[in-house]
Image (cartoon, grey):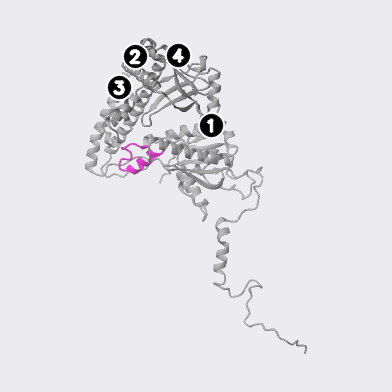
Amino acid sequence: MSKKQLRPIDAPFVALGPSGVAIRDRLKHLTTEDDKVLRLVGEHLGNLALLDLKARCADGNEHSTDTWAARKQGLTAASSSRWAGSITKATHDQWALSRRCQLAHIQSLDAGVRTLMHRLSQPVGEKGTKRAPGGYRSKGEWFHKTRRLHTLEHRLDRARADRDNGVVHVVRGGRRLLNTRHNLAKAQLTEAEWRRRWETERWFLAADGESGKRYGNETIRVTPDGEVSIKLPAPLAHHANTRHGRYVLASKITFAHRGAEWADRITANRAVAYRIHLDVQRGRWYLTASWQRPAVKTTPLETARAKGMIGVDTNADHFAAYQLDRHGNPVGDPHRFFYDLSGTAQYRDAQIRHAITQVLHWAKRCGVAAIAIEDLDFTAEKTREKHGRNKRFRQLISKIPTGKLKGRLVSMAAEQGLSIVAVDPAYTSQWGAQHWQKPLAAPRRKMSRHDAAGIAIGRRALGHPPRRRTAPPQHHQSDGAGHRTVQADRDVRGREGTRPPVTERAHDSRARTETTRGTRATSASKTVRDARSAGTWVQDPLLITG
């Protein structure tokens, strides 16, 4: 029997810090005229953004600086030069995002086609292995999969043709909201409510910042005291209530989060981008400020390992975390931080942020400088072709928030002064359960497979193998040939300290002594205290002298 070949394991690395900041505040106490002007501006610029996106999609791969300049010139006449620049930039970003999604869709279809072709080539009922799936269970399933193969091949050919011709399919307002129109009863919406939400999502009220200009933005300007003013487009200039075609809102902005950082930035006239949007369900207007942060050098990996690490295993409903010292030894008990991902998108996001906050606060109390986490990507594991019958498993891995978790964790950890070390997720659960789950289990400590995986993740980030210990030197049992690679080094203080009692014996020693004493006696006592006598002792009242 040949030995199983393991795939190469990538080296751990320190994740890059956040590259931008976004804060938001509500526009309170708006007047009726303020609401009217915001709706008019958003609708007018939204129509311009729709036309510009249509023109950009029509250009396809023939896009050039000349076509971009012509589009911007046409938009400038209907708005302003800065509004036109913001619209064209948003159009380019949306088109580029659609191209990346198109490539990912092609790769997914190609993987599905290859999997189907392999399984159809196998005999019916052929068992699969861990590395390759087997054949289908019945002739009926085999027939239906041949039909699906033709469907996927047609979709793949059409997607590849669109990519070669520079054709992308973009829905301004969101494809999900568009499809909700056909399921209003399930979404608990009326046609009028859906229509208001659809039109609002297609508005455009965003302006990029510009360094050197007053308060970092000439189109949507926010002063240090919170006054918000908008440069109205040319067709709506008659609604201005101040000079130079500007409209000042009655609301005052006070950013509770990062307010000092934002104030320092606009005081220095550095670029800040603003976006105004309407929450239709709540009937509230919000303003979001965002800016780029300078590139920060990541902490070296050796520095991140100096104070130990927290190993975190990501699961569908909780984080399993374990603290390790710099030698890779587990410290204390496992910790679990639960979250619920069964609600709405906002509820799920709040649950993730709350769980990450708990992990970060615990890491600060432990005194470590970094958190180790798996670099997960389940894109290839969610396909119907690979796990068609195992629907429960596909739903399980789909619930794990890999992409959003990475962004949230990196940005929130940077604010706490912690580094994130990403490790290869290969075999962490398997090796953690094999080497750490049973040895660390005790009557007062429950070890799960996920807790053991957290130890394996932390050890991999620290540069240690997942095994609990290595073999001693070959020629004798002392340290003459060098120290064991997984144990504490010779210069570590306290390594020769008194060994604590075994956990199982320390907790139940008294109980075992009380229950077993006198249950079975030996033929002869081994101590004087326990020596037995057949007679009874009686004190004589008279002293015998003769």
Q: Amino acid at mark 3?
A: Asp
Q: Which residues are magenta?
A: 381-400
- N-terminal label among 2 and 1: 2
What's the residue at 34%, 43% (across, down)?
392
Q: Nearer the viewer, mark 1 or mark 3?
A: 1
Does the segment drawn in magenta span residue 197? Answer: no
Q: Which residue is mark 4?
A: 242
Q: Is the residue marked by circle 4 packed among few (<14), some (14-19), or many (20+) residues within 10 Å?
A: few
N-term mark: 3 or 4? 3
Residue that label 1 marks: 414
Q: Are discs 2 and 1 less than 8 Å apart at CB? A: no
Number of other residues with Cα within 10 Å of mark 1, as a class: few under 14, some 14 to 19, many 20 or more? some
Give amino acid for label 4.
Thr
Q: CA distance from mark 3 to mark 4?
A: 49 Å
Q: Between disc 2 and disc 3, whose residue precedes?
A: 2
Q: CA distance from mark 2 to mark 4?
A: 43 Å
Q: Secondary structure at mark 1?
A: helix
Residue 104 lies in what quarter of the image?
Answer: top left
Task: Report the Cα–Cα distance between label 1 and label 3.
Answer: 41 Å
Mark 4 and mark 1 in contact (Cβ < 8 Å)?
no
Mark 2, other Cα within 10 Å: few <14 / some 14–19 / many ≥20: few
Eyeballing the image, is 102 above or below 309?
A: above
Q: Position of residue 518 (x, y in %)?
A: 56, 72
Q: CA distance from mark 2 to mark 1?
A: 41 Å
Kindly identify which numbered label has been placed on residue 62. 2
Q: Position of residue 543 (x, y in %)?
A: 75, 86
Depth check, front residue: 509 or 106: 509
Residue assigned mark 3: 162
Rendered-image quadrant of the C terminus: bottom right
